Amino acid sequence: MSWTDSNILLTYSETTPCKEIFQAVCDELGKHYEKKGFKYSRSRPKLTYKDSSIKVEICFWSSGSNMPGKYVNLEIVPNFYSIFLSKAIKTKGFLFSHGGLFYHKYTNDTNRVKIRQIYGDEVEWIDVHGYQSRITDSNNCNIYGIDEFKFNKIVEFIDTKIIPWIEKIQTEQGVIELTHDASDQRIASLDGKYGNSEFIRYVKTTFPTIDIENRLMNKTLSKPST
């Protein structure tokens, strides 16, 4: 039995337009997650799920650098929202996007970088101009040549790196885990200074015993002056 019934994914060639392959993969993901209670929007591909407190949109983007027969990019971008805040302060209640999830501090080395790819490969190097070590869970992959293994790795990425945070972010322990020893990139996504995040307001409202501003401030590692 084939892993998909999509004619495009079973028969495409080097001349198949990249946008058709991208749409077919998004449709396959939509079909998979609709069985799990998500809503799939096809026109601007994304998955949406919400409960009484949190809404998440998992958007699928591609790239203008796609190359027929060689490269079709799939970028997976989650956006988390507080339903309570959206009603209380008349905003979208935006909490964080991929910047709040996929960037981690690594070691005590000040310039060691590791990229973990969706399909399982890892790349590591020393950034001679870096000032903070980091691990990045890459949210991009090449879906040209996709097969059952690669499709399942994309599902695994969504299931392990994104979906658990729907429940985690509704717990005090989850907030502490998200902000513990946070990287600069994560702090920038959460503290609202460089975007429209309402994460600090959300934590203050939902978990008032957590000193969230102090937690984020004390984790910041400033770039050394030169």
Image: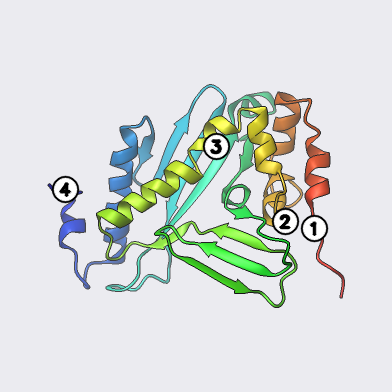
Disc 3 to disc 2, C-alpha distance = 20 Å
Which comes sooner in the sequence, label 1 or label 3?
Answer: 3
Q: Report the side of 27 relative to 77 (left or right).
A: left
Q: Is residue 95 left or right of residue 140?
A: right
Q: Earlier in the sequence, mark 1 or mark 4?
A: 4
Q: Gap in Å between the C-alphas at discs 2 and 1?
A: 6 Å
**Mark 2 / mark 1, whichever is N-terminal:** 2
Mark 1–mark 3 Cα distance, whole angstroms, equals: 25 Å
Image vertical order of residue 169 relative to residue 22, above or below: above
* Three-letter code for the amino acid on which mark 3 is drawn: Trp
- Does residue 154 show up? yes
Residue 96, position in %: x, y? 62, 43
- Residue located at (35% from left, 47% from top): 43
Q: Which residue is mark 2?
A: 184
**Residue 215 higher or lower than 14, as above or below:** above
Q: Residue 41 placed where, x, y %?
A: 37, 41
Front residue (pair 89, 150): 150
According to the image, label 4 marks what residue?
5
Above or below, comparing residue 85 to residue 214 in the picture: above
Give the numbered dot on residue 165: 3
Dividing the picture into quadrants, the one containing residue 147 is bottom left
Whether pointer 2 and pointer 1 mark residues with C-beta atoms closer than 8 Å, the reply is yes
* Of residues 75 and 171, the one drawn nearer to the viewer in this rendering: 171
Q: Earlier in the sequence, mark 3 or mark 2?
A: 3
Q: Is residue 31 left or right of residue 179?
A: left
Q: Amino acid at mark 1?
A: Leu
**Could you classify mark 3 by the number of other residues whose Cα lies within 10 Å: few (under 14), some (14-19), or many (20 or more)?**
some
Q: Say if mark 3 contacts mark 2, CB within 8 Å.
A: no
**Residue 44 seen in the figure:** no
Q: CA distance from mark 4 to mark 2?
A: 43 Å
Identify the disc placed on residue 221.
Answer: 1
Task: Give the CA separation, mark 1 to mark 4.
Answer: 49 Å
